[in-house]
Image (cartoon, helix red, strand yellow):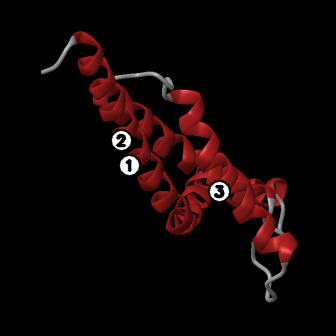
Amino acid sequence: MNETTIDFWNTGLPLALIAGATVVLPFILIPWRTRSHRRVAAGMAVSAVLMIGVSAGISALFDKRGIAAGIEIMGLWPYVRFMILSSLKSALLWVPLLALFWFNAAQRVERLRGEDMARKGGM
């Protein structure tokens, strides 16, 4: 993503892919009917770590210079480190999305707990 112009192919599509992954990962990692805030927090932590890798991978795929050239010039691990650090800029997009999903999941846990207490006959 080292272009001088901003268009759909070098900015819009990578950000759409990152946003899509941000929405899909928590749905996969957190059970829908869980009543545990710990499971929600663990799922969100795993989602955040995976999003660092996903955004680094998408940054590498859309890099105009190419993955092979970067590895040849820098070596594998310095290139991976460079991509991870450069992909953290996209955290401006996926961290708020994960925070909204976490808030939604926490509300769902409390709603399910409340429904369970109502079925048992009160507090």
Q: Nearer the viewer, mark 3 or mark 2?
A: 2
Image location (x, y in percent) of residue 73: 74, 61
Question: In terms of secondary structure, where does tag 3 sit?
Answer: helix
Name the residue that disc number 1 marks. Answer: 103
Hey, which residue is sitting farthest left in the picture?
123
Name the residue that disc number 2 marks. Answer: 107
| Residue for point 55% across, 41% down | 50
The three-letter code of the residue at mark 1 reads Phe
| Residue for point 77% across, 71% down | 12
Q: Mark 3 and mark 2 in contact? Answer it, CB < 8 Å.
A: no
Label whose residue precedes the other's in the sequence (3 or 1)? 3
Quadrant location of the N terminus in the rendered image: bottom right
Q: Mark 1 and mark 2 in contact? Answer it, CB < 8 Å.
A: yes
The three-letter code of the residue at mark 2 reads Gln
Whole-number angstrom distance, CA of label 1 to CA of label 2: 6 Å
Observer-nearest residue: 28 or 51?
A: 28
Q: Nearer the viewer, mark 1 or mark 2?
A: 2
Question: In terms of secondary structure, where does tag 1 sit?
Answer: helix
Dot 1, how many residues are within 10 Å of its Cα: few (below 14), some (14-19), or many (20+)? Answer: few
The three-letter code of the residue at mark 3 reads Ala
Name the residue that disc number 3 marks. Answer: 19
Dot 2, how many residues are within 10 Å of its Cα: few (below 14), some (14-19), or many (20+)? Answer: few
Dot 3, how many residues are within 10 Å of its Cα: few (below 14), some (14-19), or many (20+)? Answer: some
Hey, which residue is sitting farthest top in the picture?
120
Observer-nearest residue: 54 or 81?
A: 54
Image location (x, y in percent) of residue 94: 54, 58
**Is residue 16 positioned above or below 41 on the image?**
below
Image location (x, y in percent) of residue 51: 56, 47
